[in-house]
Image: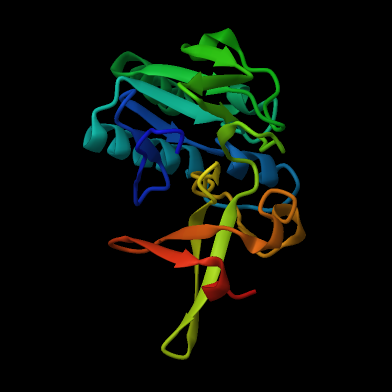
Amino acid sequence: MGGLDFLADLTGALYAPDYRALLVADLHFEKGSSVARHGVHLPPYDTRATLAAVMAAVERHRPERLLALGDSFHDRAAPERLDAADRTAIARLGEAVDVMWITGNHDRSLPASLGGRIAEEIALGPVMLRHQPRKLATCEIAGHLHPVAAVTRRGRSVRRKCFIGDGARLVMPAFGAYAGGLNVLSAAFEPLFPERRFQVWMIGGRAIHLFPADRVSP
């Protein structure tokens, strides 16, 4: 994309070797504690599990920079709900790599105490990185929509998180342990990929699987 190579990771991260940058989207830290306030009780370890997956990807690719494409926290008060161990883990992450927090619709403002830098969007050469995709002519990588795709193989439907793109735009899967997913055939994707001109890279257990749009099912 834009003359740059990008490597999809089984965790849902994306590595840009030209910039030694690791991209993640929609971490949704503290979603578990957020829904618990509304009476939905889930194991309160989603932040820890998500951080462990981030660190595994960092150790695998050895990037210089970690770029989080928005909705890193599930709500504005989520940073205050971090427990001490998770807060320490985020600090250690900032010591290992240069962290850039891109703001999202769930976390429009982030505390400076997190460390790293905060921005609305940044550029990797000709490719813009932002949270919500825009209908622009420039190349972009975004998150926000939590894409998932389903395909039918050997008579059964398989549904997985995926990357979806058309060569000019890529929407990344949600990285968070408790983040949900939206089928790529839903109406939200139509303005971005008209007439279903896209491909999906579905995340399997051991490999990333590429499918054209006509192989994707509702």
State the residue in front, 6 or 167: 167
- Name the residue at 31% across, 38% down: 57
Vertical relation: 76 (above or below) 174: above
State the residue in front, 78 or 119: 119
State the residue in front, 164 or 57: 164
Q: Quadrant of residue 61?
A: top left
Q: On the rendered structure, is 114 left or right of 14? A: right
Q: How many numbered badges does the structure rendering display?
A: 0
Give the color scheme: rainbow, by chain, secondary structure or one colour.
Answer: rainbow
State the residue in front, 18 or 110: 18
Q: Is residue 184 visible?
A: no
Q: Residue furthest top?
A: 112
- Name the residue at 42% across, 23% down: 90
Q: On the rendered structure, is 40 left or right of 30? A: right
Q: Position of residue 116 (x, y in %)?
A: 46, 12
Vertical relation: 28 (above or below) 212: above
- Name the residue at 50% across, 46% down: 167
Which quadrant would the N terminus be assigned to in this image?
A: top left
Q: Position of residue 120 (x, y in %)?
A: 64, 19
Q: On the rendered structure, is 132 left or right of 90? A: right
Q: Is residue 104 visible?
A: yes
- Name the residue at 40% across, 41% down: 13
Q: Quadrant of residue 194?
A: bottom right
Which quadrant would the C terminus be assigned to in this image?
A: bottom right
Q: Position of residue 142 (x, y in %)?
A: 58, 37
Q: Position of residue 29 (x, y in %)?
A: 55, 35
